[in-house]
Image (cartoon, coloured by chain):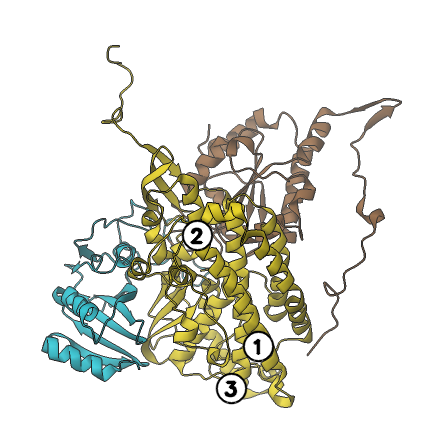
Chain colours: A brown, B yellow, C cyan
Amino acid sequence: MSRPVRFNIHPIEANIADAIGNAPSPEGFGGDGFFTARLSEVVGLARKNSLWPLPFATSCCGIEFMGTMGSHYDLARFGSERVGFSPRQCDLLMVMGTIAKKMGPVLRQVYLQMAEPRWVIAVGACASSGGIFDTYSVLQGIDQVIPVDVYVPGCPPRPEAILDGFMKIQELVGQESIRRRNGEQYKALLNGYGIE
Amino acid sequence: MTEQHHIKLPEGSIEKQTTTLNVGPTHPATHGVFQNIMELDGERVVSTEQTVGYIHRAFEKLAERRPLYQVTPITDRLNYCSSPINNMGWHLTCEKLLGVETPKRVDYLRVIIMELARISDHLICNSIVGVDTGAYTGFLYVMQYRELIYEIYEEVCGSRLTTNIGRIGGFERNFTNTAFTKLEKFLKEYPKVLKEFENLFARNRIFMERTIGGGAISAERALNYGFTGPNLRAAGVDYDVRVHSPYSSYEDFQFDIPVGKTGDNYDRFLVRNQEMWQSLSIIEQAYQKIQAFKGAEAEIYHADVPEYYLPKKEDVYTKMEALIWHFKIVMGEVDMPKGEVYKAVEGGNGELGFYLISDGGRTPFRLHFRRPCFIYYQAYPELIKGGMLSDAIVTMSSLNLIAGELDA
Amino acid sequence: MAIDNQFIQKTLTEKFGEMVFNYQDSYGMLSFEAPKEQNLKVLQYLYDEPTLGFQFLTDLCAVNYPDDKGRELAVVYHLHNLQENTRIRFKVFTAIENTDVFTASKLYAAADWMERETFDFYGVNFVGHHNLKRILNVDEMDYFPLRKEYPLEDQTRIDKDDEMFGRG
């Protein structure tokens, strides 16, 4: 039996007024030709709108990531136009797909090569917790080997879900204190994973 | 200069003429996780040592724990670019074991879904070959039409990529009018896109010079290596499971099998391209056949097998037998015949086989997947020997290696 | 014209007599067995004989029958004759104490990795294989995981509660 269709058959006409929006500026005090704000907020604003992701795509979630990178769901509008494959140049490690125990050391090595500040997003059920593969050969979640900032559930998550996870990372990046990476708590977190 | 005390060079490293290069396991994401340690003489590949298993998820052991319906989600994750074909292959295997006959309309609907999956798989492979030779545009352009295919899957089963589509005996619900509208939209718009995509690469001089001659294999070697699918057809052997052991009423359709000559990267590209045209023609024929069903026949979407097909929820709440069947199927208490069955379907990469041994218990005693990617990846060292490193990369992507299917 | 199962059975019985036995028809496919020492002879004959011509190795896998003493591991070859479009299944059984089976990788290049996978999962030692190492599992693994005696889950994991999964 059919139901009324609401999406995708009759596209909405594009309107330029809808497409342009202004992001809120950070809190501060401004006047004629100057603006003062907290340094961490300005730095956060700059960082969060120009994250360079490293797509560590191993399986099915990688194909949904390819859909997210495509023009339909477009990750580039969040500032991550340039995806890099070298960990030395990237900020955000997007782990998409199942990580087997054989792959664990490789993932750790890639994470160690990234420079601070670095963030990790675990996309999909397999990266978050092992997913449906509760077997002898699958790592039950990448947080067994590296610290993770955002988990995106789904098998595979829809591109909208991946974008939602990305936006949460952006919130984290925008609000991070500049001193966080040198602080005691962060060092203790890394030591918990055996990373100096 | 005298010997150095603090640096110990490995044995024979001064005389060694070749470079060792580690390619993988983390490539520029699109291919999947496998590692090749190549010995290079300048740019030429002398030999390579392969390591796979970086995404081994123990599907075969997992299947021994799950009753038949619970195995379908793990078959999805074999070749995840065309997961409906894996699902249908599994359902066909179960139907062969259980002796279930599907009505014609179900077969034609299955053919539509499988051919859409084949188009989706070949689109990824061909556009990634384009990306590897430097042409990124084709990939982004055809992604939009893959999204339309995903929308059709979503109408039928609710999920985009790992579809878990269908049941033993048919489908979980009839195709809605929306699904058919979207299918018509696809059939109307896609040929133009495929023509543009083909024009971008097929007679493009740069692409031809990059791909012709690379990764060639002869038909005899390919058969000895167990190649199937587009890679074998590019080498010149016209073996297609849909024609040789027809399943799901493929014998009612009229289509050609494109065959190449030299088995190199260019032939593989052209074979996959032509297969997409053939798939499009099959979908059109199937759609016309489905529209020819009228009245009560147009409402059939599953075989009448209450032992294996979950009954409607309204019946479960009101009728006794439906409740009992529902309980038995969900708890896996349905009697299974003992026996061994091997069933093959034509997946995106070749002959995807399921070897199922049942001992009468609720779960398979042994389930083995005959995965085409695993079998033809063995030939990779022979394909790239003597060629250049950049050709080796293009060969890897033109073979369409899907890591999920390789490691299972 | 497909060669039918009776013709294959007749030809094999003429050549090998009692050595090839246990002919069965499972869902249309002929399946038969031979002692493990003779597996290469039978495979070579099936390959070379012009009336049979099974020159395509579709699949090679193993099955573990823990209750069948003396025949715990079966190595199953699925062969295919592409011209005549016929498939057959050939099995050899081996005991679990001594799992030596001759390798088919000299005859079929496809058997190379399939035998490595079988070794990795079940521990079948293929004699004469040029590189019999683990292929899909971690190299340091010291047991053969797909044998029935071993569980599916990793027993050292701490975050999943077996009680909740019904396996407590």
Q: Mark 3 points at which residue?
A: B304
Mark 2 and mark 3, same subunit? yes
**Which residue is the extreme one toward the bottom?**
B296
- Say which amino acid is labelled 1: Gln
For the N terminus of chain C, the quadrant is bottom left
Mark 2 and mark 1, same subunit? yes
For the C terminus of chain C, the quadrant is bottom left
Secondary structure, mark 1, is helix
Secondary structure, mark 2, is helix
Residue A179 or residue A15, whichever sits in front: A15
Q: Distance between the residues labelled 2 and 3?
A: 46 Å
- Say which amino acid is labelled 2: Asn
Q: Which residue is drawn at 61% across and 71% down?
A: B156
Secondary structure, mark 3, is loop
Q: Using residue C161 as the reference point, say whether residue A4 is left or right of it.
A: right
- The percent position of residue B7, horizontal first and vertical second, equals 29, 18
Q: Crowding near pointer 3: few (<14 within 10 Å), some, many (20+)?
A: some
> The numbered mark 2 sits on a residue in which chain?
B
Q: How far apart are marks 3 and 1 (CA)?
A: 26 Å
Mark 3 and mark 1, same subunit? yes
Q: Using residue A12 as the reference point, say whether residue B212 is left or right of it.
A: left
Q: Mark 2 points at which residue?
A: B265
Residue A70 or residue A61, whichever sits in front: A70
The quadrant holding residue A157 is bottom right
